Amino acid sequence: MKRARAGLKPAPTKKRSTAVVSKTMSAVKSVNTAPEILLRKTLWRMGLRYRLHVKTLPGKPDIVFVKSKVAVFMDGDFWHGRQWRLRGYKSLESQFDGVSNKPYWVEKITRNMARDRKVGDQLRKLGWRVVRIWESDLKEDVEKAGKFILEQTVR
């Protein structure tokens, strides 16, 4: 059951068929997402030039500054394990209470988080600086995120 936010009653959860969930999930993009494009446009306006999705680097970072060796990842709150905090749940697991395939989702997000740590470690061992920007932080203040990345590229 979803928790109340700002005094509102939780939304009722509906059971969805596997076909509906499959169709919805297939529409989720992994590259060129709206937050990623917003960040790229901000960086471009700041005069920063970059490469996109460099396949030769671990994790295929969303934005890469080759000269300064900075790899930027845009992490969605749901997929990378932050949404439960933003929604006021006690844990990642509690976010999926009432969902029929709770173990699948907890395992999926946990694997994503472990992969994020592993990729970050691999890049740092190669001498790269790793910057992870949360989708919700970007929505709150894209200019602040852009300035933070700029600072990382000139260090």
Image (cartoon, rainbow, N blue to C red):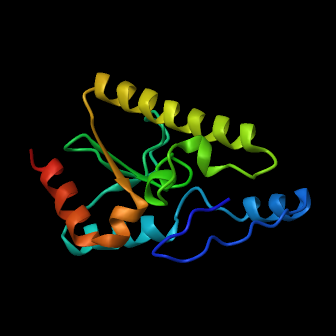
- The quarter holding residue 2 reads bottom right
> In the image, is residue 78 above or below residue 130?
below
Expressed as whole percent of the image width and height from the top left, the position of residue 78 reads 55, 54
12 and 20: which one is in front?
12
- The quarter holding residue 106 reads top right
- Residue situated furthest top in the rendering: 125
Which quarter of the figure is the C terminus placed in?
top left
Expressed as whole percent of the image width and height from the top left, the position of residue 146 reads 23, 64
Tell me if 106 is positioned left or right of 23 in this view.
left
Expressed as whole percent of the image width and height from the top left, the position of residue 65 reads 27, 49
**Residue at x 37% of width, y 71% of height:** 139
> In the image, is residue 141 above or below residue 77?
below
> In the image, is residue 94 above or below residue 87?
above
**Residue at x 52% of width, y 64% of height:** 32
38 and 95: which one is in front?
95
Residue 122 visible in image = yes
- The quarter holding residue 135 reads bottom left
35 and 71: which one is in front?
35
Expressed as whole percent of the image width and height from the top left, the position of residue 73 reads 40, 49
**Residue at x 25% of width, y 62% of height:** 145
Residue 48 visible in image = no
